[in-house]
C-alpha cells in the first residue's frame, strides 16, 4: 500500500509477540533494532502495519530521534492513500473528516506527553495550543466539514432517490480493493474510470444504467464503489458510511474476488469481504464473481471456488476475466436470474435468459 503512493520500502521488520507492548507496541529490544535500521538506511518514515494509539506513536518517535522521523500507523497510511486517490469533493471531505476525528485523541495525547516527555515529541499536531483551545478548534473544524459533506451528500441522495423512482433494480459491485470491480464496470458500461492505481483506486460510488438485450431485455443500475480491506478503523469506516450505504441498499451484490492470488490471500480477502457484508448488507442477495481467471489454471479456479463455498455456502458463483471480457455475459445472466427470483414477489417473473448481450449503456 505504501509503495503504491510512492514510498520506497527500505526494510521490513516483523515481531511476533503474545501481546502488544504497552509502551511501544513492539518490544523495547525490537525497537532498538529498528532504531539501528533507521539510522543505517537513513529512513525518513516508519510505518506500522497495525493500529497504534497516539501515545505509542509519540513514544516510538521519541526513541527514534523525535521529529526527524515520521511515524505513522496503518490507519494514517490508509488515509494517505485515500488522499492520493481522492478525485471528488465528497471523497476529499470524507477523508479530511476521518483524519481529524482519528487524530483528535492524538492531539490530546500529544499535549499530555509534551509535558511528560518534553519538547522532543515530534508531531505537527496541535502545536502550542493549550488543550481546551485545541479541542475547541478541532471540534469547530469537524462540524464545518460535516456540514459541507452533508450538502454534497444531499445532492447525491436526490440522484439516488431519482434512480429508485425510475424503478430499475440496483446491482452493486463489492469486494476487496483491487479485485477488478472498476475494470468490470468500465467494460459493462463503456466507461473509462481509473483502474489499477493500487489499493483504493475507487473511493466514490458511480452509477450507470446497463441495458441488456437477449432473449429477454432487461435494464439495471450498476454501482461501482469503494473496495474493502480488513481491520479498517471504525472512524474511517464511519466516514465512508454513506458510500457503503449504497451497497447496503442495493438489490443484488456482485462480490468480486481476485482468484489469481494464492489460496491464503483469497481466503483472507473473502473473509474480510464477508465480515463487511454481514455487517452492512446481511439481507442483500449475492453472486460471487471469481475474477482474473485469465491468470489461473483450472485447478486453481477449482480450489478458489471451494474456498468461496466454505465461506459463502449456497451462494452462486461465476468465474470471469473482466480484463479480457471472458464470461462477463455469464455474470449478467446470473445477476438477472438472481434479481428475477428476488424481485419475483414484487414483479412478474420473466422467463429465463440464456445469453444476454450488452447493446447499450447510458447515464441515468
Ligand atoms: N489479469 C487480469 N487483471 C485484471 C482483471 N480485472 C482487473 N484486473 C487488473 O486488476 C487491477 C485492479 O483492477 P481495478 O478494476 O482497479 O480493481 P478495483 O476492485 O476496482 O479496485 P479498487 O478501486 O481499489 O477497489 C488492474 O490493474 C486491472 O487491470 C482480469 O480479469 N484479469
Ligand atoms: Mg475500483
Image (tube, rainbow, N blue to C red):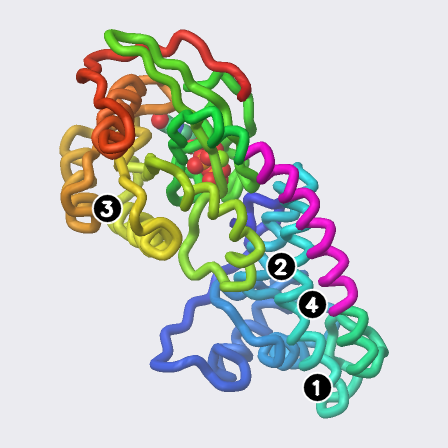
Which one is earlier in the sequence, the residue at label 2 or at label 3?
Answer: 2
Of helix, strand and loop, which one carries label 3?
Answer: helix
Measured as percent of width and height from the top left, residue 228 is found at 43, 48
Q: Quadrant of residue 291?
A: top left
Q: Which residue is mark 1?
A: 113
Of helix, strand and loop, which one carries label 1?
Answer: helix
Q: Counting other residues with Cα less than 10 Å from the Cα at mark 3, is it few (<14), some (14-19), or many (20 or more)?
A: some
Q: Is mark 3 within 8 Å of ligand 1?
A: no
Q: Is residue 211 left or right of residue 69?
A: left
Count how many numbered circles sit on residues in the image.
4
Measured as percent of width and height from the top left, residue 189 is found at 46, 18
CA distance separating discs 2 and 4: 23 Å
The image's mark for residue 263 is 3
Q: Which residue is mark 2?
A: 98
Q: Is residue 230 left or right of residue 128?
A: left
Q: Is residue 55 left or right of residue 300?
A: right
Which residue occupies the foreground of this view, 297 or 320?
320
Q: Counting other residues with Cα less than 10 Å from the Cα at mark 2, is it few (<14), some (14-19), or many (20 or more)?
A: many
Q: Which residue is mark 4?
A: 69
Span shown in magenta:
139-160
User: Mark 4, mark 1: which one is toward the viewer?
Assistant: 1
Does 228 sit above or below residue 23? above
CA distance separating discs 3 and 1: 45 Å
Measured as percent of width and height from the top left, residue 34 is found at 55, 72
Q: Quadrant of residue 302?
A: top left
Which residue is rendered at x = 43% and y = 28% of the image?
222
Amino acid at each position: 500500500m505504501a509503495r503504491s503512493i510512492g514510498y520506497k520500502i527500505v526494510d521490513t521488520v516483523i515481531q511476533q509477540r503474545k501481546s502488544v507492548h504497552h509502551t511501544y507496541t513492539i518490544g523495547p529490544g525490537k525497537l532498538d533494532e529498528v532504531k539501528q535500521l533507521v539510522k543505517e538506511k537513513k529512513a525518513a518514515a516508519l510505518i506500522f502495519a497495525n493500529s497504534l494509539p497516539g501515545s505509542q506513536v509519540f513514544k516510538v518517535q521519541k526513541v527514534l530521534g523525535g521529529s526527524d522521523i515520521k511515524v505513522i500507523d496503518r490507519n494514517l497510511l490508509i488515509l494517505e492513500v485515500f488522499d492520493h486517490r481522492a478525485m471528488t469533493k465528497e471523497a476529499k471531505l470524507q477523508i479530511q473528516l476521518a483524519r481529524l476525528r482519528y487524530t483528535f485523541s492524538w492531539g490530546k495525547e500529544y499535549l499530555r506527553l509534551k509535558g511528560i516527555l518534553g519538547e522532543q515529541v515530534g508531531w505537527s499536531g496541535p502545536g502550542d495550543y493549550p488543550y481546551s483551545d485545541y479541542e475547541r478548534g478541532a471540534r469547530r473544524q469537524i462540524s464545518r466539514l460535516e456540514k459541507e459533506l452533508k450538502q454534497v451528500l444531499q445532492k447525491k441522495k436526490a440522484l439516488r432517490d431519482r434512480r429508485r423512482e425510475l424503478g430499475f433494480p440496483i446491482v452493486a459491485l463489492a469486494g476487496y480493493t483491487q479485485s477488478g470491480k472498476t475494470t468490470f464496470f468500465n467494460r459493462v458500461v463503456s466507461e473509462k474510470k481509473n483502474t489499477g492505481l493500487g489499493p483504493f483506486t475507487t473511493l466514490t460510488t458511480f452509477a450507470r444504467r446497463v441495458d441488456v438485450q437477449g432473449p429477454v431485455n432487461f435494464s439495471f443500475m450498476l454501482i461501482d464503489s469503494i473496495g474493502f480491506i480488513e481491520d479498517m478503523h471504525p472512524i474511517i469506516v464511519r466516514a465512508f458510511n454513506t458510500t457503503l450505504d449504497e451497497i447496503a441498499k442495493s438489490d443484488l451484490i456482485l462480490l468480486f474476488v481476485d482468484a489469481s492470488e494464492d489460496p491464503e490471500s483469497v481466503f483472507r480477502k473473502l473473509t474480510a469481504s464477508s465480515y463487511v457484508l454481514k455487517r452492512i448488507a446481511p439481507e442483500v442477495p449475492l453472486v460471487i464473481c471469481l475474477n482474473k481467471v485469465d491468470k489461473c489454471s483450472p485447478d486453481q479456479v477449482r480450489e478458489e471456488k471451494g474456498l468461496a463455498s466454505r465461506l459463502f455456502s449456497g451462494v452462486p458463483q461465476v468465474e470471469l476475466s473482466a480484463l479480457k471480457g471472458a464470461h462477463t455475459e455469464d455474470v449478467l445472466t446470473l445477476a438477472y436470474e438472481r434479481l428475477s427470483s428476488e424481485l419475483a414477489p414484487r414483479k412478474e417473473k420473466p422467463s429465463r435468459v440464456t445469453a444476454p448481450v450488452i447493446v447499450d449503456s447510458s447515464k441515468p
